């Protein structure tokens, strides 16, 4: 009670600037009144299969007998889910999330004026989590589309949706970050906000203060299943491009160049003599791919693609995917301490790709200890190299010291040191003598079907 009583007195002591900030808080009422009618509730039903059930009802005297000893039948039940969406054309075209309508038998759209319509799924794209649905109606209210590129971190934004089925719920917050990458999400530069988003908000719009849609609320980070202050929205320009392709062709076409990449760390940048830790380090090049034809090599660092800077490795898949297949683009790479430009003809990403099983490795014969690296290595036989599909490399039989600390494992194959391929123990010793004064080196490691560069400190540093 004491604190409550003195609170008003403390407010009087606040500087004028503090009061001005409170008075300057945004008023969302006009935005909600104008744009709210274009936000819809999306509900779906689907048939799901559960565990086995008895062929007789529970109130039957023989229910317990059949449940324990009789034939069991798979139980089918109707699953329901709720989401949100927003109208982008007056004739009933609506954007929502792909996961909202996935596997749905029926999709129902409920407008703010309580009218309900059966909706048809025009198309959906799992990679970006965008779906287009359509209802048969005319003269509907539509949202205004904004430019997410103009969004600034710290700017106020607002969400309208149906969390937990509570229709037309409004929540507000600020933009926490832009261009955010999420695990397993390679094609969306997410807008991160602290707007309260919960189950049922999925597919709803994220508005800026001008009343323009800048994103589609897609997912949250949570350890409880509820809101914890981290929400992620798909930028509306990404969603609009996907939607246009779905409407015109029924599928989404994406570019690919056929490389496997990893992030450039400070240690790797030092090893490759890069001016700064930026770009995408190439760890493998698919044979016959656009990159292979353009002359891209393992250990190249892609720093620009089609004039766009690649600051982080996660930038490259998004930039390439947004490039139309068949386009010829310039790609700037860093090789052997110098910048080089190559031209690549972008290929098309297949709809589904299945990873091959890793090749089985056999233990080598005699191990040779390279103490400075902390590796025990043996040369591969011709049969082993053929099985692995490689022409060089050394089998790692044991790790300790720097290699163990860096996460290199027994059974990995050492393919290169920095950008120099290795094929023999003698060659390793020669290369290490050349790097006698180096503080770190980058080891190209083949693990299963993949490959990655591992920075290795040689001076005992962290």
Image (cartoon, helix red, strand yellow):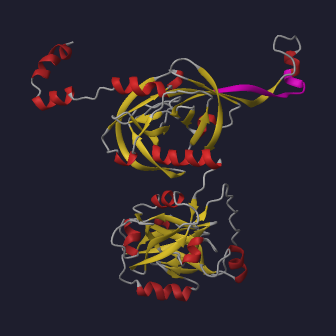
Instruction: State the image coordinates of residue 271 (x, y, percent, origin top left).
Output: 40, 75
> Total number of numbered labels?
0
Instruction: State the image coordinates of residue 413 (x, y, percent, origin top left).
Output: 59, 73
On screen, residue 41 above or below 314: above
Q: Is the C terminus in the top left, top right, bottom left or bottom right quadrant?
A: bottom left
Any part of residue 202 in sight: no
Q: Which residue is the extreme one toward the front?
A: 139
Using residue 456 as the reference point, say whether residue 135 is left or right of it: right
Tell me if residue 228 is in the magenta stretch.
Answer: no
Question: Hey, which quadrant is residue 193 in on the image?
Answer: top left
Instruction: State the image coordinates of residue 262 (x, y, percent, origin top left).
Output: 49, 64
Q: Nearer the viewer, residue 347 or 382?
A: 347
Question: Hey, which quadrant is residue 263 in on the image?
Answer: bottom left
Instruction: State the image coordinates of residue 339 (x, y, percent, origin top left).
Output: 39, 77
On screen, residue 450 above or below 161: below
Tell me which residue sits at (85%, 16%) in the image: 63
Q: Which residues are magenta?
A: 67-80
Any part of residue 262 in sight: yes
Tell me which residue sits at (42%, 87%) in the image: 434
Tell me which residue sits at (64%, 42%) in the image: 123
Tell me which residue sits at (45%, 73%) in the image: 442
Using residue 350 as the reference point, say whether residue 294 is left or right of it: left
């Amino acid at each position: 009670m004491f604190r409550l009583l003195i609170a008003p007195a403390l407010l009087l002591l606040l500087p004028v600037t503090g009061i001005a900030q409170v008075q300057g808080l945004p008023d969302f009422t006009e935005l909600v009144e104008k744009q709210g009618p274009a936000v819809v509730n999306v509900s779906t039903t689907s048939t799901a299969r559960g565990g086995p059930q008895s062929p007789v009802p529970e109130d039957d005297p023989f229910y317990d007998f059949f449940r324990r000893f009789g034939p069991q039948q798979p139980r089918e039940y109707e699953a329901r889910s709720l989401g949100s969406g927003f109208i982008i054309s007056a004739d009933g075209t609506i954007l929502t999330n792909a996961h909202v309508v996935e596997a749905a038998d029926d999709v129902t759209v409920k407008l703010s004026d309580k009218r309900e319509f059966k909706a048809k799924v025009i198309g959906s794209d799992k990679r970006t989590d965008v779906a287009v649905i359509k209802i048969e109606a005319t003269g509907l209210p539509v949202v205004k589309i904004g430019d997410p590129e103009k969004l600034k971190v710290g700017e106020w934004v607002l969400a309208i949706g149906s969390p937990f089925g509570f229709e037309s719920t409004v929540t507000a917050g600020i933009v926490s970050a832009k261009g955010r990458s999420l695990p397993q999400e390679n094609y969306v530069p997410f807008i991160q906000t602290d707007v309260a988003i919960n189950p049922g908000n999925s597919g709803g719009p994220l508005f800026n203060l001008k009343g323009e849609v800048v994103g589609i609320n897609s997912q949250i980070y949570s350890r409880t299943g509820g809101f914890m202050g981290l929400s992620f929205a798909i930028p509306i320009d990404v969603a609009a491009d996907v939607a246009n392709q779905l409407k015109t062709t029924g599928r989404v076409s994406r570019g690919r160049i056929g490389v496997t990449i990893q992030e450039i760390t400070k240690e790797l940048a030092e090893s490759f003599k890069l001016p700064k830790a930026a770009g995408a380090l190439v760890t493998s090049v698919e044979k016959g791919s656009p990159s292979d034809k353009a002359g891209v090599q393992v250990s190249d660092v892609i720093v620009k693609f089609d004039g766009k800077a690649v600051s982080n490795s996660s930038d490259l898949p998004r930039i390439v995917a947004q490039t139309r297949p068949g386009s010829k683009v310039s790609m700037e790479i860093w090789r052997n301490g110098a910048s080089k430009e190559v031209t690549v003809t972008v290929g098309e990403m297949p709809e589904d790709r299945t990873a091959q099983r890793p090749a089985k490795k056999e233990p080598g014969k005699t191990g040779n200890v390279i103490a400075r690296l902390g590796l025990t290595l043996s040369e591969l036989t011709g049969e082993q190299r053929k099985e692995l599909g490689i022409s060089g490399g050394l089998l790692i039989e044991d790790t300790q010291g720097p290699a163990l600390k860096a996460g290199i494992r027994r059974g990995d194959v050492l393919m290169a040191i920095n950008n120099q391929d290795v094929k023999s123990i003698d060659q390793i010793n020669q290369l290490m003598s050349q790097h006698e004064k180096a503080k770190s080196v980058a080891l190209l490691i083949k693990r299963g079907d993949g490959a990655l560069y591992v920075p290795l400190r040689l001076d005992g540093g962290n």
